[in-house]
Amino acid sequence: MSNNLFQDTDSILSEERIFPPTPEMVANANITAYMKSKGFEDYEAFYKWSLDNRFEFWDDMAKELHWFEPWQTTFEWTTKPFFKWFVGGKFNIVYNCLDRYMDTPIRHKVAFHWEGDNGDTRSITYEQLYIETNRMAKGLQNIGVQKGDRVAIYMPAVLEQIVAVLAVARLGAVHTVVFGGFAASALRDRIIDAEAKVVITADGNYRGGKLIQLKHIADEAVSETPTIEKVVVFNHQNLDVPMQKGRDIYWHDLLTDVPVDTVVPCEPMDSEDPLYILYTSGSTGKPKGIVHVQAGYAVGTYATTKFVFDIKDDDVYWCTADVGWVTGHSYIIYGPLMNGVTSVLFEGTPSYPKPDRWWGVAERFNVSILYTSPTGIRGLMRFGEEWPAKHDLSHLRLLGSVGEPINPEAWMWYRHNIGHDTLPIMDTWWQTETGSILISPTIIQPLKPGSATRPLPTIEADVVDKNGNSVGLGKGGFLVIRHPWPSLMRTIYKDPARYQTYWDTLPNVYFAGDAATIDNHGYIRVQGRVDDVIKVSGHRLGSMEIESSLVSHPAVAEVAAIGKPDELKGEHVKVFVILKNGIEPSEELAKELKLHVRTTVGALAVPEELEFTPSLPKTRSGKIMRRVIRARELGEPIGDISTLDS
Ligand code: WTA
């Protein structure tokens, strides 16, 4: 949303509402306990200490996890920006999610309560999750999956999706989860780039009562991929799906002869071995495969889950994201399991069958920590306060938000209607690339509506101008991070040069691609992307992906896609289309083009607005100037930010 980039700065900087924590929150917080163990009573002093002693902080966090062999060097700069953490250690994240609890009381605790789209429920303990993960690891071994192999996971939000992820990582193989809402060609491109050997999918699933034919989509994708040897199909809905002999195998058939006492020991991995590849949209080109590694990623997600969500033994934690996005990886699976908490996994949608579905889920499972998105909140706000009011939400004690800027109005509604006017809201800023939350309050800090507040301990965030100089308090500019952190991506799969641009754009800092303001208290408010990434309902899309989809249609010559502000979704997509010579614009063609995006990328990328145009502004070298188009569309000045991504 670079559109209103520095324009509403004044109103944001003058946000005067401040919500301090209660003394009880401060006294009982996990972060307070850690501060005290380091001899600090005061958060400011502690934060300053953490900047000077970041390796001590991260060593402390790492020591709370299990290592097959300890690390020798906490951090290595040598091949900047290809940083390394916990070098020399032997580690497996899955051991820390499951195995280490098998001789503790957590063994019998519920790991996940699951609720299906149709209302079915199922709960699984840590022990059961351990058993199923071991069995699946064995099943995958039996079809040839080995350390380092890539396995694609294209599944709905069922417990088996989590088992699949953990089983792959247990073997030291690399998972690449593809969001179940993506279309066949999006799945195909990811499988091809990752050179995945196996894809794990399901027959199909319902979301909001609508059937998604996952197996059919997977078949279409796999027919064009050279590397897939096996397709494992979880029978979720008893759909009659075609099974290709020799290639396809049902999940239950894979496990028939695998007894419940099967143990496949966790592969002891080097700290820096890859854990997963997750594809995300960039400003140019095809989606990039963000690579996260075993140990640093684990330490980062473990520590942030513990401090930001302040996880306690008796909490029930619910993150409403999908496992297909990074939020699901870090804060549905890995962070919560490493903290031994009971979580909720929900397959459905917020307002199906009625607008109180989410609040019903929260009530049924006595959810105490809720982590969701601004779009989710805004979407439910419009149905009115009577829907949450029907439910007993008294177990809630902490709220979170992620994925896009939360407007102060939605923040206040969330606090008032869901948070009984008292609960703290953790507005967490981070990215697929950062692996874990970097800017967020903890439960002991004063909050301001619409602000992710301040960087977490050891994180040095700043707002700078285009030369990389701090703008100083009370101003706006580009958000940067000054020092690497453990869960930072290590590279872009098969494209290290593209990874390097994050550290090359501005001198010596990590350039996040976001605009932000910093107020007189040092509170940061992230405003949105300054590149060609569009955030629709918090989902990350690239202008280029939508454009390439449309130019693959025979009627289309050229396209420009931009994001426009949207009250509900944060942003929506508008495309400008130049048709090929001799083709006439029509309502029907517009519909057909939208459908084309749906079937090639996925429903989330469908443009809300489509305008036929005879020409588009271009640079001398022929590059379409999206920024100019957007400024024109929104009646705004272009400003000088265009230099950054030219
Ligand atoms: C945006 C999602 C404002 C931002 C975890 C970032 C946010 C992009 C916030 C990354 C927030 C995420 N406030 N904006 N609390 N959290 N963003 O990779 O533009 O899907 O660069 O990761 O989301 O999106 P991604």
Image (cartoon, helix red, strand yellow):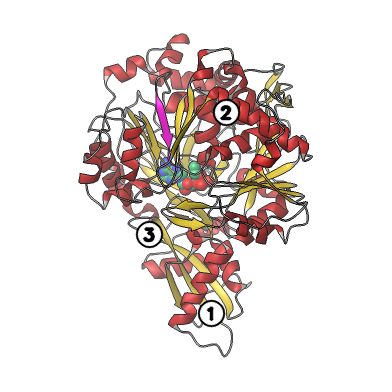
Residue 313, given in percent of the width and then of the height, sits at 43, 18
Q: Residue at x 53, y 45 (%)?
A: 325
Q: Label 2 vs label 3: CA separation? A: 42 Å
Give the residue type that dot 3 points to: Pro
Give the residue type that dot 1 points to: Ile
Report the span colored magenta. Answer: 315-320
Residue density around tag 3, few if under 14, some if 14–19, many if 20 or more, within 10 Å: some
Q: Label 3 vs label 1: CA separation? A: 23 Å
Specify whether 617 is left or right of 141.
left
Can residue 486 be seen from the camera position used here?
no
Residue 539 or residue 345, whichever sits in front: 345
Q: Label 2 vs label 1: CA separation? A: 53 Å
**Decide: marks 2, 1 in contact (CB < 8 A)?**
no
Q: Which residue is mark 2?
A: 129
Residue 493 or residue 531, whichever sits in front: 493
- Helix, strand or loop for disc 1: strand
Give the residue type that dot 2 points to: Leu
Q: Which residue is mark 3?
A: 565
Of the numbered discs 2 and 3, the one sitting upstream in the chain is 2
